[in-house]
Image (cartoon, coloured by chain):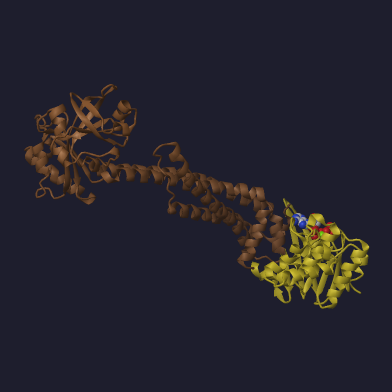
Amino acid sequence: MIELEHVSKVYRTGDIALRALDDVSLRIDDGDLVAIMGPSGSGKSTMMNILGCLDVPSSGTYRLDGTDVGRLSDNRLADIRNRKIGFVFQSFNLLPRTSAIRNVELPMVYAGTKDRRGRARRALARVGLAERGNHRPNELSGGQQQRVAVARALVTDPTMILADEPTGNLDTASTVDVMNLFVELNEAGRTIVLITHEPEVAGFAKRVITLRDGHIVGDERR
Amino acid sequence: MNLLEAARIAARGLRTNKLRSVLTMLGIIIGVAAVIILVAFGNGLQRFVADAFGPLANQIQITKTQGAISGNRAARDLTDADVDALSDRARAPALGSVTPSVNGSAVLQVVGDGQYRSSILGTQADYLDVANRELVVGSFFDDQQARNKAKVVVLGPNPVATLFGGRAGEALGKDVRVGRTTFRVIGVLKGNGQQDDVAVMPLGAARSYLLGGGDVVDSITVRAVSTDAVSQAVQQASAILDQRHAIRNPDERDFTVTALQRLLDQSSQVLSFVTIFVAAVAGISLIVGSIGVANIMLVTVTERTREIGIRKAIGARRRAILQQFLIESMILTGVGGLLGILLGIGLSVAAGVVLPRLVADFPVPSVSVGSVVLAFTVSLLIGLVAGGYPANRAARMRPIDALRHQ
Ligand SMILES: Nc1ncnc2c1ncn2[C@@H]1O[C@H](COP(=O)(O)OP(=O)(O)OP(=O)(O)O)[C@@H](O)[C@H]1O
Ligand SMILES: [Mg+2]
């Protein structure tokens, strides 16, 4: 369960302070499928980074399954990122010069998982890239890279998948495929939070949160 | 994540930048090889000197002091009686052998061939042992020939070169006129670079036929019973001669007693200083190589900040990142060190085979195990230190900052 309490994030560039998140409080229950929408620069990625334990709030608290994340050690945070969370970045963030299959294996390397090859292959198959395992990121289209990133996020079977515009580079058919995958994972009990600009994608969600200028301006359950 | 995994990731990191890795390693390779080779040359030189002069370590030279003696007395000559006194084992137990010799010069002449002015050395049958010399052909005169003042001569390489065109075999058995007396050549000395212009003959023969001089001897070579007994032998010899020459104050001595051991010790000390100095110079190239490693590791970490961010974002602990980059730099310096050792030993051995053929008597380099172990340890330490700072910096980065790095 995700709980944000009066969370703010302030970026300082020189003398200018920018409130990317302004006193946001939010609760997302286990097993939910949430879409976050909002115009560009409204603070979506900022919030997602905090939820993914990549960044810390300037003020306020973030509780994940009841634990105050702000009090956790570096190693505990690394373990949470490794086991509990699968993160799909807006900009893919695949390792360059490294094959797709190795990229998908990477979280399992740090987890010390057995049968990494097999699991990585199955994960790639789930996103329709069974044949592309040996390609490097620069040999894949943007949409294919996006799907490798999705495969890497779900390969560890995390309880929570956070995806920053996972369908941003996909055509309609692939978008539907990936969204069906998310729905399937959600039906199997995973919590899924995704950012999107597309209403069709948001249509798959059970709950849609809208951000503007660092505030939550809409929160509807479908 | 275990070490093996970290090593695999590190090796992959190095492979993606092959040329850079090889060039960085080259600095370490050259540094390590230079240390090993230069130390090997220094060792070879030390060993060469020890082999050449080691047998002389128990030698003591006694000569008449040249010039004025304090107390305004004329220096007394060393005589056969002095030699006899020194040969008394009861009075001088530390002295093993006593070999007098007389020096002079004379013209050597071969009938029909040229002539050559050579120095003459009149001595005893144990000269070869005492002077640590060898013969090329023939034999040396024995005690009986020495006693009988036999007219036999052993030539050094220089007179053989002039009189017999350097062919030692041809000189053997020939008659040579030395001054006005005919001597038979019974042997030829191998050159030692110091006393090659010489004709050696029985001391009695030199006195009777060439140099005259009654019972005077020019120098006495004494050998101590062991190298440990050298200083004792010096004391005993000095005491005997003091008594015989009626000297009460050592400052007034009219003879000089010199132990070669002291000179040898000094020369080997100088050589080890030279070896250390040269090794230090080679060490500098190792330091330069290690700065190269540190530099490359810093560049690598900066360049791969995003990679570090990705790894941390998907759950790499600090330790894993630290290990990855430390192992990368240790592979660079460890493999570089091993290759440097191979290169260093290879070149030292090759030099030992080739150089003595090009330059006669070139000291064969001798690789010291110590220098190999030291160079390898140092290169591993360099990897640890030069990689440590960048690796630590990488490990401490916050994931979001690393990911945002352009
Ligand atoms: N590291 C940073 N330093 C300074 N300002 C930042 C930083 N990251 C984000 N911002 C600012 O914070 C605001 C929110 O950024 P954020 O990336 O969360 O937007 P977003 O909603 O994800 O936009 P988009 O839909 O374009 O991805 C923007 O105005 C952005 O300029
Ligand atoms: Mg964004």
Q: Residue A34, image x and y in percent? A: 85, 71
At a point 45% along the width and 40% down the height, the residue shown is B355
Q: Which chain is brown?
A: B
Q: Residue A185, image x and y in percent? A: 83, 74
* Rendering quarter of residue A218: bottom right
Q: Residue B349, image x and y in percent? A: 47, 47
Along the line of sight, the residue nearer the viewer: B379 or A34: B379
Name the side, left or right, on which A196 lies relative to B380.
right
Q: Which chain is yellow?
A: A
* Rendering quarter of residue B319: bottom right
At a point 70% along the width and 59% down the height, the residue shown is B309
Residue B249 visible within the image: no
How many marks can you see?
A: 0
Name the side, left or right, on which A178 lies relative to B12.
right
| Quadrant the N terminus of chain B occupies | bottom right
Q: Residue A82, image x and y in percent? A: 71, 69
The answer to whether B137 is drawn above or below residue B112 in the figure is below
The answer to whether A195 is drawn above or below residue B193 in the figure is below
Quadrant of ligand 2 in image: bottom right
Residue B186 visible within the image: yes
Name the side, left or right, on which A210 lies relative to B143.
right
* Rendering quarter of residue A107: bottom right
Along the line of sight, the residue nearer the viewer: B184 or B293: B184
The answer to whether B37 is drawn above or below residue B211 in the figure is below
At a point 34% along the width and 31% down the height, the residue shown is B167
Along the line of sight, the residue nearer the viewer: B359 or B171: B171
Name the side, left or right, on which B265 lies relative to A182.
left
